[in-house]
Image (tube, rainbow, N blue to C red):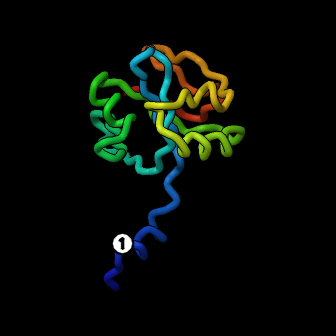
C-alpha cells in the first residue's frame, strides 16, 4: 500500500457536502454557517460532528446553547450558501441579507432554510 499525504488523501474522501450549520443567535434569529467538515461519529447513538474555528461565532453559539441543526441545502441555495461564508453571523443577519426563506423544524426553536434536503437536529 502506498503512503499518501493529506492532500492526496482528500482525493479519495472528497467532496464532502457543503452544509449549512444553523444555530441560534443571541437575538433569537438563525445564524447560518457554511461548513464542509461534517462527519458521522456514531450510529448508535446517532452522532454527527462538525469542525469550526475555536473563535468562530457558530462554534461559540453552539457551545453556549447546546443546540444546532446541520442541514444539506437544496440546489436553489448554491450561490447563497457561498455568500453566507463571506461574513460572520456575529455582525451580519445572513438570512435577511440573502433573502433566504426559512421554516420551522419540529422539536427545535432554530429555523432552517426552506430549500433543505436534509436536517439533522442536535
Q: Nearer the viewer, residue 110 or 43?
A: 110
x and y percentages locating residue 56 in the rendered image: 36, 40
> Which structural element holds mark 1?
helix
Q: Residue at x 44, y 68 (%)?
A: 10
Q: Quadrant of the N terminus?
A: bottom left
Res 101 quadrant in image: top right
Res 45 quadrant in image: top left
Q: Pick out the residue farthest to the bottom.
A: 2
Q: Pick out the residue farthest to the front.
A: 91
Residue 46 lies, with reference to residue 114, above or below; the image says below
Q: Pick out the residue farthest to the right.
A: 76
Q: Is residue 41 left or right of residue 22?
A: left
Q: Which residue is mark 1?
A: 6
Q: Is residue 35 left or right of residue 49?
A: right
Q: Residues within 10 Å of mark 1 (few under 14, many from 20)?
A: few
Q: Nearer the viewer, residue 37 or 55?
A: 55
Q: Residue at x 69, y 42 (%)?
A: 75
x and y percentages locating residue 2 in the rendered image: 34, 85
x and y percentages locating residue 85 in the rendered image: 53, 44
Q: Nearer the viewer, residue 31 or 41?
A: 31
Q: Residue at x 57, y 31 (%)?
A: 94
Residue 46 lies, with reference to residue 8, above or below; the image says above
x and y percentages locating residue 19 in the rendered image: 51, 42
Q: Quadrant of the C terminus?
A: top left
Q: Nearer the viewer, residue 116 or 20?
A: 20
Amino acid at each position: 500500500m502506498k503512503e499518501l499525504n493529506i492532500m492526496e488523501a482528500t482525493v479519495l474522501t472528497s467532496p464532502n457536502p457543503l452544509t449549512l450549520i444553523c444555530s441560534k443567535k443571541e437575538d433569537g434569529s438563525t445564524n447560518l454557517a457554511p461548513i464542509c467538515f461534517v462527519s458521522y461519529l456514531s450510529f448508535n447513538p446517532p452522532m454527527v460532528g462538525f469542525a469550526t474555528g475555536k473563535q468562530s461565532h457558530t462554534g461559540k453559539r453552539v457551545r453556549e446553547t447546546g443546540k444546532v441543526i446541520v442541514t444539506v441545502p437544496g440546489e436553489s441555495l448554491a450561490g447563497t450558501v457561498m455568500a453566507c461564508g463571506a461574513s460572520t453571523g456575529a455582525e451580519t443577519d445572513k438570512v435577511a441579507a440573502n433573502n433566504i426563506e426559512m421554516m420551522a423544524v419540529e422539536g427545535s426553536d432554530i429555523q432552517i432554510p426552506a430549500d433543505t434536503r436534509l436536517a439533522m437536529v442536535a
